[in-house]
Image (cartoon, rainbow, N blue to C red):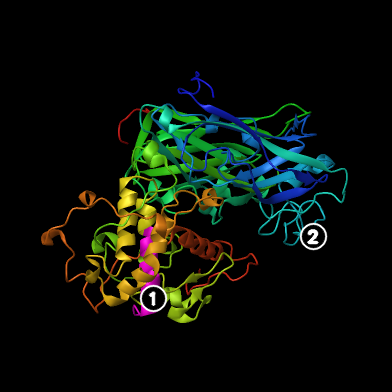
Amino acid sequence: RREATADIDRPHWFRSCLGPPLTMTPGGVVNQAFVLNYPFPKDRRVLIGTRMWEFVQGDLDDLRPVEINQLYIHHIAGSVVLGNGAENVRQSEEDAAFSLPLGMLSGDDNDRMIFHVIDLRETGDQWLECLECRCPDGEGSYLGIGGSGGELSDDEDEIEEGAGGVSCCYNCTDLLTPTIDYRMRYNVTYTELSEIEEPVEPLIMISADVAPTIDRYIEWDVPMWQNMPEEHALPGNPKVQVLERVGTLRELFGGFFPGAVYTGNDLLEVHRCIGHLHIAGLGMWLYDAITGDLLCHNDVKYGDDPAADKGFLKTVTVTNYDPPLQILSDREVRLVTHYDAEILHTGVMGLIFLMVAEKDMAVGPVEAALTADVCLAPRCDVAAVLPNGGCRDALPDSILCSFGGVCSCDDLLAIKDTVGGCGGVYMSSFGNVSVASLCAEHCGCGEDILEESVLEQIEQQTEDNCHYAGEKCTRYLSNVYACAQPWAKGSEEFNDSVMAILAQNGEEMALEGTKIGDPSLHRFDTKPLTKSDVRSCDPKDYPEKSEATGVNSNTVKKNSFHPFYLFPVVVVGIIVGLGLYSHSRRKKQKIDAVAKSGSSEADKDEEVI
């Protein structure tokens, strides 16, 4: 335990961890998920301080840092530590501690991270081709400029669709030895919420991707300047590629997953701006599209040490806002990237991340618990369990509509990879989704469809009420548990079919809902909550409601069905949206089972901008 410092304004705990070995050959490529030592408590949220990471090699008692010209970090993904790629090695600025009462909280992250790293030993003068993954096929033979699973172009300065990036070689050489075990070493600090006097105001991350401006997603290729479309050339310097994406913050920023639509607060309070670029990146800018004011500039620095980082992107600058930048989510902005087009570059990125205030609730020790309390409420409050009462199509309100462009059930049912009609699924290489979960009313609200709809609404309500522990979460779970009891007062207000669904599933769903945060944190719970642990709630906490505030008999009535808002599961929406997006945006690539529809396919003060 350490006392407050100039960088971290509260007492904090320090942990240094070592990841599992990545055994690599010269020219070898690893792109897979690894389970790391989770550095934070698993039974409660804590306030994250500063995190920093690097890769090391050698014996465990003699570990040495690895330079990026030997092991290139194409990207890392996950949240045990925060980082994008090679520009974040041994850097702390993008993941530095915030001043109280602001901060990032643990609990919504798991213990897995994806490492996409490339061993550049023995690649010689072709190190750039290797780290940009220019391979003619997926067999592991490095043949220079090519299409990473596609075909070589007739013009060696041009590549086929899909070259570079995540679709990478297995190996950039044919060498099998000598191997090296690389490990991630990461240092983290955190503070217990019980050790600070004020509750924490959580920050979350939202992001935007510039690639859709040229009909790409996350990655794109920078052709040699002679082959570049004229509209992408920087005026006065045709050897610089300029991409510009314009839209409202709500349209461009979609949370941590780039591409989705931001559905949060109307007024954003921004505290930090972070960017991610690849080699050849010259900078990224975010402007107010109306006034032209610069909101954020991510500058770049390249290495000049031949023994460590010459020619490699080693830093992308970070912007902090104190006071915070406040901007309306419907404000139009311009996201701009510049890339050097003197030579070909493949699989580059242009992502921007904003750390914004969550504005949900202040979190103290009670709300930080990762196991919620539940008790048996004295009565069943129908309106609280299913606040909208019946059965309605969720598709128009889902990410599949806002992100994938499929907003009617007729369109969904007409897609080639929707099989089985209302009783079937939409199939794609990204996963399957039942049609009934999105089109309950359209499909007739039969008992099977009704059950799926009711259960999904309870799951969504649990997610909404139980992001944090505390009274709000406990009241909802206790109410669900009570409504599962056939004898509970108020349960007669359900129609018989809904009551049967609750009786069969409610207790289990309430107990499962007590597990807050990422499911992996509960993987080894020693004493999971069971029905025998549930005691009756204090009746004083659940006063009787007057008839005026009771459930409208016209909303929920025996043996009749009425519409309610069916919330889609967020992960399912993203999966479906990704499937449709990949179909429409990468139509030339050979992918399995993608959807095809009928279409052709501040002064930074506290002023509100």
The answer to whether residue 348 of the structure is visible from this angle is: yes
Callout 2 amino acid: Glu
Q: Position of residue 489 (x, y in %)?
A: 22, 65
Q: Position of residue 412 (x, y in %)?
A: 44, 73
Task: Name the quadrant of the C terminus.
Answer: top left
Callout 1 amino acid: Ile
Q: Which residues are magenta?
A: 443-460
Left or right: 421 in relation to 199 = right
Q: Position of residue 242 (x, y in %)?
A: 55, 43
Height in image: 85 above or below 583?
A: above
Q: Position of residue 383 (x, y in %)?
A: 24, 62
Assess whether residue 13 is covered by the magenta stretch: no
Magenta stretch secondary structure, dominant: helix
Q: Which residue is mark 2?
A: 139
Q: Residue at x 76, y 31 (%)?
A: 63
Q: How many marks?
A: 2
Decide which of tag 2 and tag 1 comes sooner along the chain.
2
Would you identify the image quadrant in which residue 368 lies?
top left
- Label 2, label 1: how many angstroms apart (C-alpha)? 46 Å
Badge nearest the viewer, 2 or 1: 1
Q: Nearer the viewer, residue 235 or 492?
A: 492
Q: Residue at x 61, y 30 (%)?
A: 91
Q: Tell me the number on the disc at residue 200.
A: none
As helix, strand or loop, the secondary structure at mark 1 comes to helix
Task: Name the quadrant of the N terminus.
Answer: top right
Q: Which residue is mark 1?
A: 449
Would you identify the image quadrant in which residue 307 lies?
top right
Give neighbour class at mark 1: few <14, some 14-19, many 20+ (Cα, 10 Å).
Answer: many
